[in-house]
Amino acid sequence: KMRVTVVALVDVVMLILLKRFKDSHPVLLWTALISSTALQTIASSMQFNAQMTFFASRVDRNIGGSYMTLLNTFANLGGTWPASPVLYLLGRLSNPAFDAYIPMQLLLSFLGLCWLGAMGKRVTWLGNTKEGDWSTGGAGKVKVEVDLENGTRVRGKRARSRSASRKIK
């Protein structure tokens, strides 16, 4: 769960090391830079593959690719819009005497850990939900009674005599 936040913290440590040793150890500089890029690429690929596997396992076969495209679109929007406010804040908070990158990275990593703590159980519950529960059609046709007096949906024997029955796909 914490691997995405840990990569950001490793990035901060790498930046601090680079600032400290950039002139005296150029090999360390390039090794840290390549290692950080490789770790970020691996974490990003793992996250993308896990996300696509989750979406593919939850796609309603009645809708197919359109549903998968919709899920992927929302995931892309959720992952890309935060970059604009973060870059704006970096530009506003940075000046020649103060580099806002490290404090912002630490703050956002802390917020990510708080989010994992607050929403981790709900995300795990969603991940463990049965495949059939994600389907728009359920396990087939469901008989639903509509109460004509107040327009509410009633299932089973509780429907009154003035109810209309219809099948919903």
Image (cartoon, grey):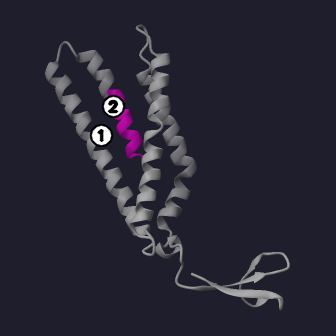
Q: Residue at x 81, y 81 (%)?
A: 148
Where's residue 86, x and y in %? 47, 29
Q: Is residue 99 left or right of residue 15?
A: right
Local secondary structure at mark 2: helix
Cβ–Cβ below 8 Å for labels 1 and 2?
Answer: yes
- Indicate whether 81 appears above or below 135: above
What distance separates the C-alpha of mark 1 from that of mark 2?
A: 9 Å
Q: Which mark is residue 11?
A: 2
**Amino acid type, residue under disc 1 in the picture:** Gln
Magenta stretch prevailing secondary structure = helix
Where's residue 90, x and y in %? 45, 22
**Amino acid type, residue under disc 2 in the picture:** Asp
The answer to which of 161 and 52 lies nearer the viewer is: 161
Q: How many marks?
A: 2
Say which residue label 1 marks: 40
* Residue 87 covered by magenta stretch: no
